[in-house]
């Protein structure tokens, strides 16, 4: 029996080592005993060919469906590409966030060090002012002591007789009482 493919895709079937093949909307001779089996298995074949007008309508619908499918595939690819770019952007943003966090932590540590150094500078300046005051006080005390020492030396020098030439710089000692 001559059976006609009812769809726009090729159909293949095998029975007892024989391959039966239908081109889209094409025909193929099949033994009559297999016809009920083919229908039972749901193969899209029939003894009447599809009328040309229906073929054209189906072809148009298939082309429309193919065009829709192509558009869907194109949109899916665009979506996939956008998701990939979004993933890259997210990874880049996360990396930038990590760098910013690290920089912020580094800046906070540096600020703490600067604050500690500023405090140390204030302490050292305060200590330096105290030391300068102590040096000024000690300088005043040294000047006062030098003046006192000069006065004492002057008193001692005025109250002593000058050594004579005969004694060669030795003082005359009073005679011993024997």
Image (tube, helix red, strand yellow):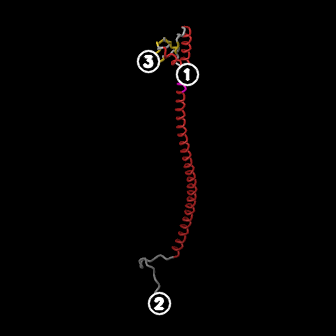
SS class of the residue under badge 2?
loop
Query: Label 3 vs label 2: CA separation?
Result: 166 Å
Q: Is residue 81 highlighted in magenta?
A: no
Q: Residue 177, which numbered label? A: 2
Task: Report if the CB atoms under discs 1 and 3 are less than 8 Å apart.
Answer: no
x, y percentage for residue 129? Answer: 57, 57
Query: Label 1 vs label 2: CA separation?
Result: 144 Å
From the image, state whether disc 3 or disc 2 is nearer to you: 3
Residue interval drawn in magenta: 75-79
* Quadrant of the snapshot with the C terminus: bottom left
Work out whether 92 lies above or below 107. above
Work out whether 150 lies above or below 2. below
Task: Report if the CB atoms under discs 1 and 2 are less than 8 Å apart.
Answer: no
What residue did someone put label 1 on?
72
Query: Label 1 vs label 3: CA separation?
Result: 36 Å
Q: Closer to the N terminus: mark 1 or mark 2?
A: 1
Q: How many marks?
A: 3
x, y percentage for residue 43? Answer: 52, 18
Residue 130 is left or right of residue 169, and the answer is: right
Q: Closer to the N terminus: mark 3 or mark 2?
A: 3
SS class of the residue under badge 1?
helix
Nearest the eye: 136 or 61: 61
x, y percentage for residue 99? Answer: 53, 40
What residue did someone put label 3 on?
19
Nearest the eye: 100 or 88: 88
């Amino acid at each position: 029996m001559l059976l006609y493919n009812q769809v726009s895709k090729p159909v293949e079937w095998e029975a007892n080592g024989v391959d039966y093949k239908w081109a889209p909307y094409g025909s193929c001779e099949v033994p009559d005993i297999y016809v009920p089996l083919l229908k039972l298995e749901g193969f899209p074949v029939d003894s009447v060919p599809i009328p040309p007008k229906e073929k054209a309508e189906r072809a148009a619908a298939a082309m429309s469906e193919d065009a829709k499918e192509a558009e869907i595939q194109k949109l899916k690819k665009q979506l996939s590409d956008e998701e990939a770019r979004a993933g890259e952007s997210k990874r880049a943003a996360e990396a930038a966030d990590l760098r910013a966090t690290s920089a912020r932590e580094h800046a906070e540590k540096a600020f703490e060090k600067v604050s500690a150094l500023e405090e140390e500078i204030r302490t050292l300046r305060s200590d330096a002012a105290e030391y300068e005051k102590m040096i000024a006080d000690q300088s005043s005390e040294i000047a006062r002591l030098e003046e006192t020492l000069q006065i004492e030396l002057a008193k001692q020098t005025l109250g002593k007789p000058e050594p004579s030439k005969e004694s060669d710089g030795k003082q005359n000692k009073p005679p011993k009482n024997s």
